[in-house]
Amino acid sequence: MSALAAPPVATDPRLAGDVLAHLEAQLVSARKLLHAVLAQTVAIRAQDVDGVVRQVATFQAELERRARLEEDRARLLARAGALLGMTPAAVTLSQLTTLMAPHDAQLAHARSAELQGLLAELQREHTCNQALMRQELAFLDHLLRLVGAGGMGPADAGAYTAGGIRPAHVPYTATARGALNLQA
């Protein structure tokens, strides 16, 4: 063996199949998350509160599943790290695929690229939903401040509580906020 030859690497005949199956599970999960986020966008735009809540629940359930996928990922990296003689945190996809047949390595890279694209799209859509929700809540807050200010202190006007919107304790008087003065 020459001085430039790579040291022999131990093999794990199931590693390639496990990595490819894991990447496919990650893709399925990312698609479910994206579907939930896109459905949430529709619900937000339609001002369908129940629909938004349903999609948040779907999203949360899939995030819990993803936590298990991350545990599987950590185990795969530990296996690959042991074979490569490095810490799991140092293992890259390129290094991991050196332990695979060329066809499997190519498939792993393709699945990884698809996963990265899905996650980027998911992030963009989620960011848009956050902005839409902020707009909706700001508008709702504005309306509540206009109609709910009568008889309450400034700190209580339009306040949200665990049970919903805090009701006004006295009849609405628009002149309290100067929004409507019929006597002028």
Image: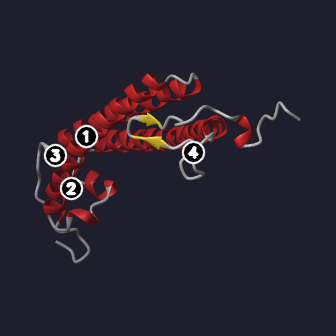
Where residue 12 appears, as percent x and y from the top left, is: 11, 49
Mark 1–mark 3 contact, CB under 8 Å? no
**Who's the residue at 32% across and 42% down the image?**
108
55 horizontally vs 69: left or right: right
The amino acid beneath tag 4 is Met
Q: Which residue is mark 2?
A: 77
Label located before the other in sequence (4 or 1): 1
For discs 1 and 2, the disc positioned in front in the rendered view: 1
The amino acid beneath tag 2 is Leu
Where residue 76 appears, as percent x and y from the top left, is: 18, 51
Q: Which residue is mark 1?
A: 64
For discs 4 and 2, the disc positioned in front in the rendered view: 4
Q: Quadrant of the N terminus?
A: bottom left
Q: CA distance from mark 4 to mark 1?
A: 42 Å
Where residue 181 appears, as percent x and y from the top left, is: 81, 35
**Mark 2 crowd level (few <14, some 14–19, many ≥20, 10 Å Cα):** many
Mark 1–mark 2 contact, CB under 8 Å? no
107 horizontally vs 130: left or right: left
Q: CA distance from mark 1 to mark 2?
A: 20 Å
For discs 3 and 4, the disc positioned in front in the rendered view: 4
Q: Quadrant of the C terminus?
A: top right
For discs 3 and 2, the disc positioned in front in the rendered view: 2
Q: Which residue is mark 3?
A: 15
**Mark 1 crowd level (few <14, some 14–19, many ≥20, 10 Å Cα):** few
Q: Which mark is residue 159?
A: none
Q: Which mark is residue 152?
A: 4
- Of residues 64 and 134, the one nearer the viewer is 134
Label located before the other in sequence (1 or 3): 3
